[in-house]
Amino acid sequence: MWGTAWIICAQKVLADAFIDVWYGAENLTWALMWDHTVEYARAVALTLEEAWQTGGAPAVKEALSEIEKILNQGEKFRGLPKP
């Protein structure tokens, strides 16, 4: 899948979870990164999809919070450096 397709997949999960893709406070860490690599977009999309399937909107919000914490600490997310 192309990088754009992974981003669209992640955006669909966010929309399903009633999170504004561009301006939702829960999504600002992800939304503001314009230089997504395909691998990074894939990792985020898969994480959000898994969260949606296991716990719906609350789990998606928690996943975004966890991604933000990991990136803010300068750690790698799913083995990938911050874009």
Image (cartoon, grey):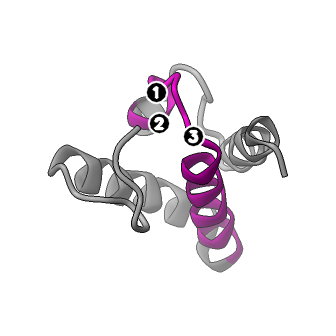
Q: Is residue 30 magenta?
A: yes
Above or below 32: residue 76: below
The residue labelled by disc 1 is 33
Q: Is residue 51 magenta?
A: yes
Q: Are marks 3 and 1 in contact (CB under 8 Å)?
A: no
Range covered by the magenta-colored residues: 29-53
Tag in front: 3 or 1: 3
Mark 1: secondary structure: loop
Q: Are marks 2 and 3 in contact (CB under 8 Å)?
A: no
Amino acid type shown at disc 3: Thr
Above or below 33: residue 46: below
- What residue appears at the point 65 percent right and 41 percent down from the top-left corner? 18
Tag in front: 2 or 1: 1
- What residue appears at the point 35 percent right and 51 percent down from the top-left corner? 81
Residue 78 place in picture, x, y as percent: 43, 67
Q: In the image, which disc is placed on residue 30?
A: 2
Q: Earlier in the sequence, mark 2 or mark 3?
A: 2
Amino acid type shown at disc 2: Trp
Residue 10 place in picture, x, y as percent: 69, 47
Distance between the Cα atoms at labels 3 and 1? 10 Å
* Prevailing secondary structure class for the magenta stretch in the rendered image: helix
The residue labelled by disc 3 is 37
Instruction: Tell me the quarter of the picture where residue 38 sits.
Output: top right
Q: Residues within 10 Å of mark 1 (few under 14, many from 20)?
A: few
